[in-house]
Amino acid sequence: MIRFKDFTFKYNAQVEPTLRDINLEIEKGQKVLIIGPSGCGKSTLIHCINGLIPFSFEGEKQGSLTVDGEETWDMSIFKLSRKVGTVLQDQDAQFIGLTVAEDLAFALENDVVGEPELHQKVDQIAEVVNIRSHLLHSPQELSGGQKQRVSLGGVMINDCDILLFDEPLANLDPDTGKKAIELIDEIHRKTGDTIIISEHRLEDVLWRKVDRIILMEEGRIVADTTPDRLLATELIRKAGVREPLYITALKYAGVQLRPEMKLASLDTLDLTEEDKQRVRDWYSKRSDSGAPSRTEPVLQVRDLNFTYRSDRSQAEDHQALKDINLDLMKGEMMAIVGTNGAGKSTFSKVICGFENCDSGSLLLNGQDLKELSIKERADHIGYIMQDPNQMISKVMIFDEVAMGLRNKGLQEEEVTEKVNEALKTCGLWPFRNWPVSALSYGQKKRVTIASILAMEPEIMILDEPTAGQDYRHYTDIMEFLKSLNERGMTVVLITHDMHLMLEYAERSVVFSDGRIIACDTAANILTDRDIISRASLKETSLYGLAELCGITEARGFVEHFIDYERRYERHA
């Protein structure tokens, strides 16, 4: 279906090629996963297949790329779109209709399909992607998982032979992510289409079988093999991609990984008794992690309630927060987790003053936050959005970081001193005179952190700080936040990333349906199947590995893994 032969591509705006000497064949009906660090060329490869290159992003190519036997450079993007459907990472950017039914029917309407046939085809596709009960809803009203089903239905309506998924899990909670992978697998089995997935979350994609994994680095394919074979090597870690946690634990325990162990899934993992004993011996060397004991609260939340009032787009009032009680301790790093719509972001908005609570109290170092305006709260509590582009308003880096200080009326000499200190802390001082547009996504994220850091708040709240980041950039961002935390900054992380929660959070708060249903260590939460089910979380694969090896203290095993990483591996 797809054949790259000696293929090289260079964007017109760049000096060096983004793709180099690509030789790749993908056969009809295969399910292929493409992984690699940010900037390795994954997105460019996908854009070449679906026609966005060269029709939207121009550049020079060498070699050949054919889809279903035809050279893509000789095809129109319309003709190519009949063969290749793409589900974008940002589903909202893909919607066209005012309702789900209209969105699914869009391509059929363009083809002037008659009304009876159109309705029949929309019903058929809605049934396949399990969205039929929402046909009259607006796409914007749906959950993340439901939006993905609509996007998938929209490209399936054309009977495409190839389906591309660009970071399908990036904005989904763990349980919805599992369901998304199950849906893709179900579509693959039902249609026999060729499926190509580009994703950072390797372990989550391997929840269902894939035929091949293509690993890319610096524009080249460095591995093209089965999951079992690739996981038995060190190539994934060396490339800066996060390998499954149970694979990492086996390596820590000194188990020699072999393809015949069926490494791609815990369900198929075949360990010898000697391998299991190695894991048990490694666990027996555990020691007390010595987690810090914190007793001084910086923020006290008591009996907090908040309701979104109805308007024209909302049929009735919605109580988003219900009887919230929580103490945030000074100097801790805490994670807030839960399904989409559980109340996590609303809780942060109420703390920052973007929304006013119905009842209850918020005390910051004993002072009632109701007495403070949003501007006054910002002196104590910094809020960093998921997308840095939504926070940046200045052209130059220095001016962006200085904006809040200048708005406070500080003298320029003091502004310069504080900005330079924040830029140095964030590793951005060498770029202080650069335009923001010259930075990478991760560097822009640091600019937003620096702009908040310069205000010297006591609490920093970050919404999905690592979303869409590969493991290398994820680690850079989190180690940087950890360094701020070690200097005394209280850090709150709103996240869907269970790895982040395990590795960095001292304590995790779980929201479900507007309530706090758990406040405990990550290890305890991710080994409690009741909480996992109620909050749409995902049981850590470390739990399954412990059970497989006959370790009855699964929580202790998870805690030992976390402690081992923190003590010995994180800075290796």
Image: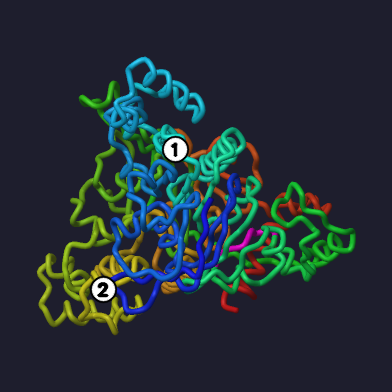
Residue that sits furthest to the bottom in the current view: 430
Residue 23: which quarter of the image? bottom right
Say what secondary structure mark 1 lies in: helix
Q: Residue at x 51, y 66 (%)?
A: 5
| Amino acid at circle 2 | Ala
- Give the alpha-carbon distance from disc 2 to disc 1, as whole Å: 34 Å
Q: How is the image coloured?
A: rainbow
Q: How many marks?
A: 2
Residue 135 percent across, percent down from the top left: 38, 23
Q: Residues within 10 Å of mark 1 (few under 14, many from 20)?
A: many
In the displayed structure, does residue 186 sit left or right of residue 282? left
- Name which residue lies at 76% across and 62% down: 259
| Location of the C terminus (image quadrant) | bottom right
Task: Provide residue 336's location: percent of width, then percent of height.
Answer: 46, 50
Q: Nearer the viewer, residue 494 or 366?
A: 494
User: What amino acid type should be assigned to the residue bearing mark 1?
Assistant: Leu
Mark 2 surroundings within 10 Å by alpha-carbon count, few (fewer than 14), some (14 through 19), many (20 or more) = few
Establish if 218 lies above or below 109.
below
In the rendered structure, find residue 438 and report the number of the disc placed on it. Answer: 2
For residue 138, say whether it is visible.
Answer: no
Q: Which residue is labeled 1 in the image? A: 152
Image coords of residue 499 (percent x, y): 56, 57
Task: From the viewer's perspective, tell me whether residue 185 is left or right of residue 253.
Answer: left
SS class, disc 2? helix
Query: Residue at the location (34% across, 70% down)?
Result: 60
Does the stretch in magenta take in 570? no
Q: Residue at x 33, y 17 (%)?
A: 115
**In front of the other: 88 or 256:** 88
In the rendered structure, find residue 230 and report the number of the disc placed on it: none
Residue 270 position in % (x across, y down): 82, 54
Q: Which residues are magenta?
A: 241-246
